[in-house]
């Protein structure tokens, strides 16, 4: 594991065709680069291609539209200061804090929140140099200040952190170069700066901001440079990141142990109740939600509470930030010994002596414990909170001023008195049972009389449900409500009506209490639920089924007049009493109806643009006299008017109505035009933003349900935290609380992974690896594989420079999420082992590996052979009947049937096999995926799985060394075959065609002896030949000479002619030019 | 680390929705005391069939049924989709099973093609006609409608059934948030009058009767007559009427009635029409048969506020809301609107995404 793998370096061709080609290409490219104008628009095709490419690039720039969820008062932006040790992180934070607040912090422990501007707050967070902490910081930081030590150079932590950032959604990054005063030589400093900048740009992006801090003065960086940096921080623009945009999260800036001291006394290792404080970010959160704390695991929130903002943005519009408002909030750093709580400021008068001395008397101990645990404000806080839970959150001004807070309390009390005249009673209730559910508290805070009524109504409903259940006749309804005289007047005493629907005559004042009624009937409180459950069990013995039975009972006396208003044909103003819809709506509907009656063509348009139009119409309709007033008389008179004007147009509608219709029609027309102008991307974006806006508007409306919204300062309580969390608590390690909606089930996660190019080893299947994805970090055993279009083949090792797939066992992750893999035990200088994205969550996956079974022929008939040693029993053979097999020499065959019990089988081949052949059966075997999931509990105590190599190293065991597994040089003996020999008797019987014929030809080797005459002839012929050759050669030379002469002459003539022509042209154009000038 | 606790319920009532919600929310559930005091204790055959169907539709689910059949533990796996083929017991209609698939199928790993055989219509469960013409059409408010199909290949009337439907539902990644509070007014009424193994005239007689009731409100009525013959008509004679009223804003109101032995077609037509009128009178954007669907898909929406308006909350919906709270920790804001006698429902979506769906 330690030795670095060496690779053969790539060698560039320096000679040969490809090198030449490259050279030519380069020259051409240079020419294009040096003289771009000469090469523009040479061909239409190229221009077209370029235009297309440009369009493609533009399209690539689009991001998936994402809703901007930043609340109106955004939470402080998290500025993480990251860097290797001893590079000046703390000094940087101190300098920045000092720049913003004129405070010089003595030490940085935990996040430091400050008000940095009229509309901006910043939380500074120092990142410890530990991969676990670094992953968590990378998941929450909005802006990263990457501190680089110029005197040392880049360090691996920086690159690791950048990789972590990239996989978890890249936030903004700024570099800060420190220790520049170490350079005495100015030139060298310049060079270092330049090199740093270039490298930084390649790592982050071109033009990434890099600050140079040239020195330290009075324990902080130069004020001028820090001012510069702070200006850049204040104008930074944050892009929403996918994961954070769809999950709630909180960076805890204060942690408190709320465990009952009595319990701790009896059992110091009891699970703790822990309160975490911080600004909520991302989406919303609610009590009983499940969260994940990286480094601690999954927990259920016991409660979430809204606290007043400890570091509020000044509420009034001011020109500049007042000194008073330059707040600093760092509860764990104990700024000036001040600690903020919900409604008070605690001043810590240094650590008391008895605490420091650690020897405590009984009484002192008790006192100190009392101080610690019962934080009086907490209890107080709870009931205050409940008192105005339905109301809007407090304005931010209420912080840190007890006087102001008292006011609020008073007003809240008054409010409760208006609601109910026993506010004190409900207070008592709350004090008694703190752990009651919020719904209960809500109920308690509403008036007592109503509450009783609700209860009664709820009981009635329950009873009715039971009753229904008991008489198992089919009248039992759950799905469909029946008995609908109720729809007529709503005064039917039917339980469901009274409880759920009716009484339309209640004045709007009562609506508030009614609302509580309905919510309470549905959701009730704890005991109501229980009764519900028991009732279910009670009703269980009848057969009449429950869930989805329809019912067909209906009142025979349907009031048809009432019904008419539900149809477009119906008239609206037959109102007998005030139970119609609002007037605006009515008019609207009238309009629609009229439109449909008159111009049926438009109905579809109207449906398509229903909501927006209605709103528009309503807005517009306000000015209309007709719509402004209510009451039946008015409308009656309208009718009269209508009648008078009825004849005025061919549709039989009044002028006014026609005008309105026309306006509406135009509006629709216009809006449609606009719609076409907007492109699809814009539309999607707007739609998404519309959802977010409507959610923002609905925040007050949903206040009852106790959602905690992004930007609020909240306290969340977790009940079953292991004691190690508090025991080993280190404020410098960031604690992140991340919401995990629907991400808890365990499954196989299919991911695409690539070994990091700086990680010196390839990854091995079965080596436990830590994966950081979403909020989580967990150790798991990966199985690498690749898909070859037919099957998923297991890989023992990940490919060196290629993506491959991996399957791990872990909790659900949304497909498309990026992840980062590293080993817990850092073995190399660069820690990130691989990165990739999640493809899929699945319960099963078929990953196969090759299995080659070998056997040896035992007995050979013609094309049949009996093969043994491949299987051990006939049962095994039976499983492979019909499987195709092959010998080493390439003869294919098939498994037929077992013969005998020892695993020998009969096989047929396409040819006769030899006894020396080996028979193969190639098969694929699905491998089981190891289901190992071990969340890294770095905040508690880490127990992790070691790889086999680690264990061997620790136990000093050698790697098993099988002689068989060694690669040996392959020695192939050349096989000599005996020459083919045909017996004589056989030869004799062969037909002539096939007989071996021996023809003796020795012509080559025979010598020629010439006599005198022959010699003469031969010499003569030779001479003649020679003469002829010489002659032709001379002739050829002569012809070539003549030809050259001719070409020369012709060229000369041509040149002459050219000159003549040129001259002629010249004179012609001269004259022509003169002529033109004359003209 | 706190383990996620198993949810406990008692009684056989609301069994289906709890199983479905368990699978969607990935929370294990234990249901005890299923007809424990009954002379015939334990799960009924259709409930067992439902468990089988859920087992087929998911991968990795573990169903543990106690020896007596009075308690069920479900450890949910992932919804897979794909091909499902099942013969449903004739004790319940196909609608019973199909409703569970309607809630699950859009969130599977791949497109679901389910072939269910059994009774296509009865007076207990939603008929397949209503499912086709209203339930699946209601999908469109949530952006789930593309490619959804329900084909009735054979009709089967009780008691012997013999019908067959094919349900095809592609998968989505997330639900579209709903903002549908304007119920509008009824602009047309459509319906299907079906008859199997009876005189073809029966269907027309039902249509006549229904039109007689409805014509005074609206002229735009069209009721299809759907008479099945031969092998497609199932094993038993039967007839019935399914009506859907559509409003100007796209709200659908349904009513249906199936004939019992001895019923006259005219009676069925008239009563179905009056049922529809009663349903219309309740108002709201979703009728009482589809309230559960609206509530479920609202709870599954992205983290935005979603709202709708419904008529009276049925007791079934009340229980559904409670179960949604238990499974998803979602509480609805329920505000009665006294003027129109309806209820405004609003909640924040849970940000549900289909984690099983593949990316490329």
Image: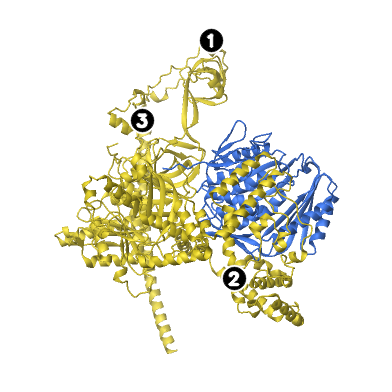
Question: Does residue A796 appear to the left or right of B106 in the view shown?
Answer: left
Which of discs 3 and 1 lies nearer the camera? The answer is: 1
Residue A614: x and y in percent read 62, 70
Q: Foreground: A119 or A288?
A: A288
Mark 3 and mark 2 residues within 8 Å of each other at the beta carbon? no
Q: Can residue A691 be seen at all in this image of the molecule? A: yes
In the figure, the blue chain has which letter? B
Label 2: how many Cα within 10 Å (few below 14, some 14–19, many 20+):
some
Quick one: quadrant of the N terminus of chain A?
top left
C-alpha separation, residue under disc 3 versus residue under disc 1 = 53 Å
In the figure, the yellow chain has which letter? A
Q: Foreground: B299 or B171?
A: B299
Are the residues flagged by discs 3 and 1 from a single subunit? Answer: yes
Figure colour scheme = by chain
The vertical placement of A897 against B90, above or below, is above
Q: Can residue A1039 be seen at all in this image of the molecule? A: no
C-alpha separation, residue under disc 3 versus residue under disc 2 = 125 Å
Residue B261: x and y in percent read 82, 44
Question: Residue at left 60%, top 39%?
Answer: B56
Disc 1 is placed on an element classified as: helix
- Give the residue pinned by disc 1: A985
- Give the residue pinned by disc 3: A1015
Residue A615, labelled with which disc?
2
């Amino acid at each position: 594991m330690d030795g670095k793998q060496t690779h053969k370096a790539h060698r560039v061709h320096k000679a040969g065709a490809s090198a030449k080609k490259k050279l030519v290409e380069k020259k051409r490219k240079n020419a294009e680069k040096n003289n771009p104008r000469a090469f523009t628009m040479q061909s239409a095709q190229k221009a077209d291609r370029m235009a297309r490419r440009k369009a493609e690039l533009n399209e690539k720039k689009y991001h998936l539209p994402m809703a901007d969820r930043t609340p109106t008062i955004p939470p402080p932006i998290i500025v993480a200061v990251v860097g290797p040790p001893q590079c000046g992180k703390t000094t940087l934070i101190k300098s920045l804090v000092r720049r913003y607040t004129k405070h010089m912090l003595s030490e940085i422990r935990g996040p430091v929140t400050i008000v940095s501007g009229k509309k901006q707050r910043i939380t500074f967070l120092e990142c410890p140099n530990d991969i676990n902490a670094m992953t968590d910081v990378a998941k929450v930081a909005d802006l990263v200040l990457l501190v680089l030590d110029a005197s040392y150079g880049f360090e691996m932590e920086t690159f690791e952190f950048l990789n972590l950032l990239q996989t978890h959604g890249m936030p903004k990054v700024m570099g800060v170069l420190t220790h520049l005063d170490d350079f005495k030589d100015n030139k060298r400093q310049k060079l270092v700066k330049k090199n740093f900048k270039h490298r930084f740009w390649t790592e982050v992006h071109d033009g990434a901001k890099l600050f140079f801090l040239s020195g330290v003065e009075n324990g902080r960086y130069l004020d001028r440079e820090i001012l510069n940096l702070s200006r850049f921080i204040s104008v930074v623009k944050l892009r929403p990141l996918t994961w954070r945009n769809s999950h709630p999260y909180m960076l805890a800036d204060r942690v408190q142990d709320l465990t009952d001291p009595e319990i701790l006394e009896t059992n110091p290792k009891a699970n703790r109740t822990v309160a975490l404080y911080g600004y909520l970010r991302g989406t919303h959160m609610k009590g009983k939600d499940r969260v994940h704390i990286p480094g601690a695991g999954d927990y259920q929130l016991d409660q979430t509470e809204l606290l007043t903002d400890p570091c509020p943005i000044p509420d009034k519009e001011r020109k500049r930030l007042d000194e008073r408002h330059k707040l600093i909030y760092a509860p764990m750093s104990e700024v000036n010994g001040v600690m903020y709580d919900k409604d008070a400021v605690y001043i810590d008068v240094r650590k008391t002596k008895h605490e420091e001395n650690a020897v405590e008397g009984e009484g002192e101990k008790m006192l100190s414990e009392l101080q610690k645990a019962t934080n009086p404000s907490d209890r107080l806080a709870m009931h205050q909170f409940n008192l105005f839970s339905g109301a809007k959150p407090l304005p931010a001004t209420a912080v840190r001023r007890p006087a102001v807070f008292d006011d609020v309390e008073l007003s809240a009390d008054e409010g409760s008195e208006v609601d109910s005249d026993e506010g004190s009673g409900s207070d008592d209730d709350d004090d008694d049972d703190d752990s009651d559910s919020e719904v209960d508290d809500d109920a308690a805070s509403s008036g007592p009389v109503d509450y009783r009524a609700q209860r009664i109504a709820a009981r009635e409903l329950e009873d009715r449900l039971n009753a229904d259940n008991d008489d198992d006749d089919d009248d039992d309804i759950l799905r469909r409500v029946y008995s609908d005289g109720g729809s007529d007047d709503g005064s039917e005493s039917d339980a469901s009506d009274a409880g759920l629907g009716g009484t339309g005559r209640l004045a709007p004042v009562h609506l508030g209490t009614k609302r509580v009624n309905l919510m309470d009937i549905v959701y009730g409180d704890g005991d109501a639920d229980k009764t519900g459950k028991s009732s279910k069990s009670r009703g269980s013995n009848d057969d009449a089924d429950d869930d989805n039975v329809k019912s067909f009972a209906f009142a025979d006396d349907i009031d048809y007049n009432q019904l008419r208003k539900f149809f477009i044909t119906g008239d609206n103003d037959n109102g007998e009493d005030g139970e119609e819809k609002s007037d605006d709506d009515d008019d609207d509907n009238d309009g629609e109806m009229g439109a449909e009656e008159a111009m049926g063509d438009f109905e579809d348009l109207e449906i398509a643009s229903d909501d927006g139009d209605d709103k528009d119409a309503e807005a517009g309709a306000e000015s209309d006299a007709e719509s402004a007033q209510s009451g039946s008389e008015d409308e009656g008179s309208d009718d009269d008017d209508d009648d008078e004007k009825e004849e005025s147009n061919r549709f039989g509608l009044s002028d006014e109505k026609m005008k309105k219709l026309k306006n509406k029609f135009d509006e629709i027309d216009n809006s449609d035009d606009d719609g076409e102008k907007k492109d699809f991307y814009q539309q999607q974006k707007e739609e998404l933003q519309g959802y977010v806006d409507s959610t923002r508007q609905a925040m007050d409306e949903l206040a009852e349900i106790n959602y905690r919204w992004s930007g609020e300062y909240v306290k969340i309580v977790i009940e079953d935290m292991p004691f190690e969390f508090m025991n080993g608590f280190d404020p410098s390690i960031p604690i992140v609380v991340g919401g995990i909606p629907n991400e808890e089930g365990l499954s196989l996660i299919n991911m695409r992974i690539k070994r990091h190019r700086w990680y010196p080893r390839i990854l091995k299947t079965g080596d436990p690896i830590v994966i950081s994805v979403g909020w989580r970090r967990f150790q798991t055993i990966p199985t690498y594989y690749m898909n070859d279009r037919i099957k998923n083949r297991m890989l023992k090792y990940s490919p060196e420079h290629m993506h491959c797939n991996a399957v791990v066992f872990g909790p659900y992750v949304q497909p498309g999420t990026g992840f980062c893999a590293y080993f817990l035990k850092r073995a190399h200088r660069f820690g990130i082992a691989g990165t990739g994205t999640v493809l899929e969550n699945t319960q099963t996956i078929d990953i196969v590996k090759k299995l080659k079974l070998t056997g040896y022929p035992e007995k050979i008939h013609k094309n049949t052979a009996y093969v043994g040693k491949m299987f051990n029993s006939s049962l095994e053979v039976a499983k492979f009947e019909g499987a195709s097999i092959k010998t080493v020499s390439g003869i294919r065959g098939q498994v037929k049937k077992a013969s005998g019990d020892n695993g020998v089988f009969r096989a047929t081949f396409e040819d006769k096999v030899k006894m020396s052949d080996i028979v193969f059966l190639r098969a694929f075997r699905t491998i089981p995926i190891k289901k190992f999931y071990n969340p890294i509990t770095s905040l508690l105590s880490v127990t992790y799985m070691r790889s086999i190599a680690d264990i061997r190293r620790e136990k000093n065991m050698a790697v098993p060394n099988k002689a068989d597994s060694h690669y040996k040089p392959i020695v192939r003996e050349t096989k000599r075959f005996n020459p083919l020999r045909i017996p004589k008797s056989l030869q004799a019987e062969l037909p002539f065609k096939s007989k071996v014929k021996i023809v003796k030809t020795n012509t080559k080797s025979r010598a020629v002896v010439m006599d005198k005459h022959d010699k003469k002839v031969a010499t003569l012929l030779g001479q003649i030949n020679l003469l002829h050759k010489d002659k032709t050669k001379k002739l050829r030379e002569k012809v070539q000479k003549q030809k050259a002469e001719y070409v020369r002459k012709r060229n000369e003539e041509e040149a002459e002619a050219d000159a003549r022509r040129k001259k002629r042209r010249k004179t012609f154009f001269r004259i022509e030019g003169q002529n033109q000038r004359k003209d | 680390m706190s383990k996620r606790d198993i949810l406990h319920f008692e009684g056989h009532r609301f069994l289906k929705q709890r199983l479905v919600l368990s699978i969607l929310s990935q929370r294990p559930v234990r249901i005890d005391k299923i007809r424990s005091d009954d002379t015939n204790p334990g799960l009924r055959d259709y409930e067992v069939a439902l468990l089988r169907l859920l087992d087929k539709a998911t991968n990795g689910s573990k169903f543990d049924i106690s020896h007596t059949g009075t308690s069920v533990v479900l450890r949910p796996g992932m919804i897979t989709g794909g091909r499902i083929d099942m013969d449903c017991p004739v004790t319940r209609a196909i609608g019973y099973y199909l409703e569970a698939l309607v809630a699950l199928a859009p969130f599977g790993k791949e497109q679901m093609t389910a072939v269910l055989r059994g009774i296509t219509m009865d007076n207990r469960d939603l008929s397949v006609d209503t499912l086709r013409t209203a339930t699946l059409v209601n999908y469109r408010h949530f952006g789930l409608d593309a490619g959804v199909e329900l084909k009735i290949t054979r009709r089967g009337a009780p008691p012997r059934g013999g019908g067959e439907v094919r349900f095809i539902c592609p998968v989505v990644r997330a639900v579209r948030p709903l903002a549908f509070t304007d119920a509008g007014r009824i602009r047309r009424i459509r319906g299907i009058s079906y008859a199997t193994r009876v005189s073809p005239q029966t269907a027309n007689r039902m249509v006549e009767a229904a039109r007689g009731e409805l014509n005074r409100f609206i002229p735009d009525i069209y009721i299809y007559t759907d008479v099945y013959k031969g092998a497609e008509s199932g094993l038993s004679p039967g007839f019935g009427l399914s009506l859907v009223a559509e409003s100007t804003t796209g709200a659908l109101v349904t009513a249906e009635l199936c004939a019992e032995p001895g019923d006259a077609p005219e009676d069925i037509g008239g009563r179905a029409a009056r049922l529809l009128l009663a349903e219309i009178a309740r108002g709201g954007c979703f009728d009482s048969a589809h309230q559960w669907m609206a509530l479920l898909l609202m709870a599954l929406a992205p983290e935005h506020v979603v709202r709708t308006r419904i008529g009276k909350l049925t007791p079934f919906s009340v229980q559904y809301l409670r179960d949604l709270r238990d499974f998803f920790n979602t509480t609805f804001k329920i505000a009665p609107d006294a003027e129109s006698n309806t209820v405004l429902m609003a909640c924040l979506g849970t940000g549900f995404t289909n984690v099983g769906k593949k990316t490329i």
